[in-house]
Image: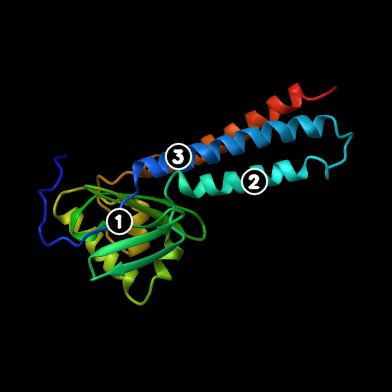
Amino acid sequence: MQPLPPDPGAPAMRRDAPTTRAVVLTVLGVVMVSTAVVGGAVARGADGDAGVPAPWFLLTLVSFTALFFLWPGISIRARCRDGRVLEGLTLLGWRGVDLQRLTWVGAAASTRSTFLVLLDDRGRVAMDSRVLRRAGPGVAELVGRAVWAGQLAGRYTVPPQAARFWGMPISPVARPSGLAGTSTKQIALVAVVAAAIAVGVLLGSP
């Protein structure tokens, strides 16, 4: 799919600074792995005293939680500017997509909510549907109309989970989406933490 041509009337949107994002992710990753290894080693030699490794595992949990949201770019708040720009507040600030220039829609449904990922030709926002609902009256419906318009324009096919959330007809060719790597990144974080703790236990005093 070719990117849409530049739109002189498109509002300016803030995007992640690649260098800043890379530095933050690297620092958090190092803290998460190192504290998990040390915590595992300390726990091995603590003779069952959970309070000894607790500070290390607390640091692991804090850095893991930050990475859990930051790496996939999950938004904790949402707002819509000018009826066109959907913005999500990530741990690095507000980031947005132009609803008139959406190029991809992803979704994953649970029993309580739907996780949504929207991409335009320059960026992405990812958020729980409950965050979108809390953005204000009519915002979720406005986004839904833009998502539907993008499908009618042939830019993408709305996945079944997103279609159900907005009450849209499900396209016969719609397939569940992979969320642009969001769930894969989170699973990878869990695996890295588990492996780091295991390494720490193996390196700890017998």
Read off the residue under disc 3. Answer: 23
Q: Quadrant of the C terminus?
A: top right
Q: Position of residue 173 (x, y in %)?
A: 25, 44
**Is tag 3's residue or tag 1's residue first in the polypeptide sequence?**
1
Read off the residue under disc 2. Answer: 61
Considering the numbered disc 1 on the image, is that residue within a helix, a strand or a loop?
Answer: loop
- Depth check: give the residue in front, 118 or 162: 118
Residue at 34%, 49% in the rendered image: 16
Residue at 14%, 40% in the rendered image: 2
Residue at 42%, 49% in the rendered image: 73
Quarter assignment of residue 60: top right
Give the spatial CA distance, label 2 vs label 3: 19 Å
Quarter assignment of residue 81: bottom left
Residue at 57%, 35% in the rendered image: 30
Tell me which amino acid carries mark 2.
Leu
Q: Position of residue 113 (x, y in %)?
A: 47, 60
- Between marks 3 and 1 in the image, the one whose residue lies nearer the viewer: 3
Colour option used? rainbow
Read off the residue under disc 1. Answer: 14
Judge whether residue 104 can be spotted in this image. Answer: yes
Q: Is residue 201 left or right of residue 86?
A: right
Label 3 packing within 10 angstroms: few (<14), some (14-19), many (20+):
few
- Depth check: give the residue in front, 114 or 201: 201
Considering the numbered disc 3 on the image, is that residue within a helix, a strand or a loop?
Answer: helix
Which disc, if any, is residue 190? none
- Between marks 2 and 3 in the image, the one whose residue lies nearer the viewer: 3
Q: Quadrant of the N terminus?
A: top left
Considering the numbered disc 2 on the image, is that residue within a helix, a strand or a loop?
Answer: helix
